[in-house]
Amino acid sequence: MISIEGNFENPEVNELLIKHFKELKSVSPEGSAHVLDIPGLKISSIKFWSIWEENILIGCGALKFLNKNHGEFKSIRVVDNFRKKGFGFKIIEHLIKEAKKLNINKLSLETGSGDFFIPARKLFKKVGFKECVPFAHYKEDLNSFYMSLDI
């Protein structure tokens, strides 16, 4: 697997992120969607990677710095053709490896609490994430599920 930092202008990456944004907005109630659009992923506190197998896009993921040692996963997405084949786990492993290189020792994430998000919650639990209270700017929300992992 190869990872490329940034790469927003790549048409495949751009298309995947737009699809991700639209889909998550469509399954999240108003005020409970925390998905970032492409300009939101380009801010200086976020590092974004697209993940490739040779010349084929597998997925993407981002790491947002909440402070010097605490990061948040954002925009983890596997291309539809590669879902349920272990690539989500590989993307998360890559993000954890990058977080360690950046001296981050705690990772957190927000995902939805609805049925649509069950596969994501199962995957994060498999990696070792545990349910936690809202962090950073998040607040209690019945539509959100918060998790964290000490690395």
Image (spheres, rainbow, N blue to C red):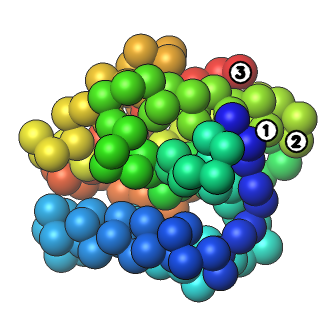
In this view, the residue farthest toward the front is 55
User: Which badge, 2 or 3, comes first in the chain's sequence?
Assistant: 2
| Residue where numbered disc 3 is placed | 151
Left or right: residue 86 compared with residue 64: left
Q: Which tag is nearer the camera, tag 2 or tag 1? A: 1
| Residue where numbered disc 2 is placed | 102
Left or right: residue 65 compared with residue 80: right
Q: Amino acid at mark 2?
A: Leu
Residue 26's mark? Answer: none
Q: Secondary structure at mark 2?
A: loop
- Up the image or down, 26 lies above or below 99; here it is below
Q: Secondary structure at mark 3?
A: loop
User: Which badge, 3 or 1, comes first in the chain's sequence?
Assistant: 1
In this view, the residue farthest toward the left is 115
- Location of residue 132 (image quadrant): top left
122 or 108: nearer the viewer: 122
- Cα separation, mark 2 vs mark 3, equals 12 Å
Q: Assess disc 2: are there few (<14), some (14-19) or many (≥20) residues with their C-alpha within 10 Å of its C-alpha.
A: few
Residue 98's mark? Answer: 1
Q: Position of residue 125 (x, y in %)?
A: 39, 19
Q: Quadrant where the C terminus lies? A: top right
Q: Assess disc 1: are there few (<14), some (14-19) or many (≥20) residues with their C-alpha within 10 Å of its C-alpha.
A: some
10 or 66: nearer the viewer: 10
Q: Is residue 43 visible?
A: yes
118 or 129: nearer the viewer: 118
Q: Amino acid at mark 3?
A: Ile
Q: Quadrant where the N terminus lies? A: top right
Number of disc labels: 3
